[in-house]
């Protein structure tokens, strides 16, 4: 099966090979070296001097951690789809008050609207933004939104689960306080590891917030980080995998080359589906460079296209949330060769012909 999923995605063979490494204790010198090196590679990748912690969870763990560590009472969530809604749910489940800035599905959060919202609600302590809303294949203008958040002096949490690794994120320049992702997306590593950069301001806030729990306490992570470790047992194979892909990206010419590769895969997919007469769901100009969300043809369920593609050996992704039936998605994260994009588009052409008969 060829994977064009939205996570877990296919991994480079070199990454899988590296993960076979024999185990060692997470308090050993061997682990410390791996940990230190991986954190430094991530800091360089994200252009940050902030702490970057390695969490034994998926990305949602760090979403919850940002809320628990850095919000006393109230936050604002920008919502463009299902993962933005998740941020709201996580905040409510942790007893926080939430203001919600929701856009019509398929549309991004715009800086002027966010500015208005923050002027109306000066009591919010932090703003959550989903950089790339995977459910509808939409990317937000993060740099501009970050500028607005910082002009109001709020903490900024960025869900970069399906963008980190595939799209530029400048953590320090843009002033992101918590920026998190999962291993199983653009880094193309199996699931089980989350990473998150945490600013000094976020760590300071964590000192005073009550009931933040233990497992995801940023201050505890900071303490263990000083000795190149984590409070609990980390997913060592995934850290080996992440270390490998970060080094491979450097070998291949650096992160901008890797982003260019993502853009090129995405361009080929988009042009291919448009040649087949299909259109993309999100508003023009805000289509995600890591996942294409495609409108199913009139009268056809996106799920049927997904199922038929599976029978031809290609795993795409079903639509998600409100547009589950109306759309299907094609991811371009992880290990994907150009020739497989051509084969996938050929198969999609066949499926559309079968359905229209
Ligand atoms: C934008 C976004 N946020 C959060 C998540 C949840 O990530 P995880 O499953 O790693 O917790 C996903 C997963 O697809 C996602 O795409």
Image (cartoon, rainbow, N blue to C red):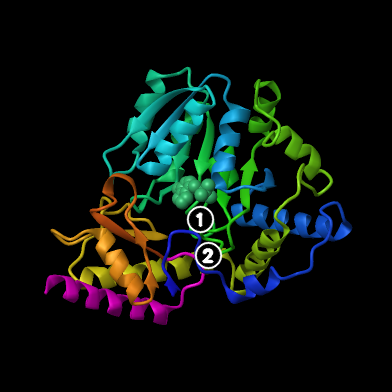
Q: Residue furthest right?
A: 29
Give the mark nearest the N terminus, 1 or 2: 1
Residue drawn at x 35%, y 42% as measured from the top left: 81
Indicate left or right for 274 with 56 as reference: left
- Residue 179 at x, y percent in the picture: 56, 43
User: Which residue lies under the disc numbered 2?
Assistant: 256
**On the image, which quarter does residue 269 sit in?**
bottom left
- Please tell me whether residue 350 belongs to the stretch shown in magenta: yes
- Please tell me whether residue 210 belongs to the stretch shown in magenta: no
Total labels: the figure holds: 2
Callout 2: helix, strand or loop?
helix
**On the image, which quarter does residue 34 sit in?**
bottom right
Callout 1: helix, strand or loop?
loop
Tags 1 and 2 touching, CB below 8 Å:
yes
The segment highlighted magenta reads: 332-357
- Residue 198 at x, y percent in the picture: 64, 39
- Residue 208 at x, y percent in the picture: 68, 21
Residue 170 in sight from this viewpoint: no
Within 10 Å of disc 1 (Cα), the crowding (few <14, some 14-19, many 20+) is some
User: Which residue lies under the disc numbered 1?
Assistant: 168
Q: Label for residue 191?
A: none
Residue drawn at x 40%, y 82% as measured from the top left: 339
Indicate left or right for 237 with 257 as reference: right
Residue 187 in sight from this viewpoint: yes
Within 10 Å of disc 2 (Cα), the crowding (few <14, some 14-19, many 20+) is some
Our reading of the magenta stretch's main secondary structure is helix
Residue drawn at x 28%, y 43% as measured from the top left: 105
Quarter of the image for the N terminus: give it: bottom left
Whether residue 126 is situated above or below residue 252 in the rendered picture: above
């Amino acid at each position: 099966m060829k994977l064009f999923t939205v996570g877990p995605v296919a991994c480079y063979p070199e990454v899988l090979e590296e993960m076979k490494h024999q185990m060692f204790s997470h308090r050993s010198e061997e682990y410390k070296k791996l940990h230190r090196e991986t954190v430094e590679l991530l800091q360089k990748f994200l252009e940050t001097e902030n702490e970057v912690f390695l969490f034994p969870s998926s990305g949602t763990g760090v979403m919850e951690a940002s809320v628990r560590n850095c919000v006393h009472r109230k936050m604002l969530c920008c919502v463009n789809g299902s993962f933005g809604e998740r941020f709201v749910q996580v905040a409510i489940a942790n007893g926080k008050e939430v203001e919600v800035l929701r856009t019509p599905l398929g549309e991004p959060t715009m800086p002027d609207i966010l500015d208005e919202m923050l002027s109306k609600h000066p009591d919010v302590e932090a703003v959550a933004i989903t950089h790339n809303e995977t459910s509808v294949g939409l990317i937000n203008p993060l740099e501009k939104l970050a500028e607005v958040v910082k002009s109001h002096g709020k903490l900024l949490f960025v869900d970069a689960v399906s963008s980190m690794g595939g799209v530029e994120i400048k953590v320090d320049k843009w002033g992101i306080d918590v920026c998190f992702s999962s291993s199983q997306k653009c880094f193309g590593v199996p699931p089980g590891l989350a990473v998150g950069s945490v600013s000094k301001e976020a760590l300071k806030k964590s000192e005073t917030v009550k009931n933040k729990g233990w497992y995801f306490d940023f201050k505890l992570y900071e303490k263990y980080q000083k000795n190149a470790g984590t409070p609990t047992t980390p997913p060592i194979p995934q850290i080996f995998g992440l270390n490998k892909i970060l080094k491979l990206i450097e070998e291949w010419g650096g992160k901008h080359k890797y982003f260019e590769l993502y853009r090129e895969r995405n361009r080929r997919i988009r042009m291919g589906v448009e040649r087949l007469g299909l259109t993309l769901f999100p508003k023009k100009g805000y289509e995600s460079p890591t996942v294409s969300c495609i409108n199913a043809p009139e009268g056809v369920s996106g799920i049927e296209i997904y199922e038929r593609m599976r029978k031809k050996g290609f795993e795409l992704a079903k639509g998600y949330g409100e547009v589950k039936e109306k759309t299907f998605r094609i991811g371009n994260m992880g290990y994907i060769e150009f020739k497989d994009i051509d084969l996938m588009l050929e198969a999609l052409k066949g499926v559309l012909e079968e359905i229209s008969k």
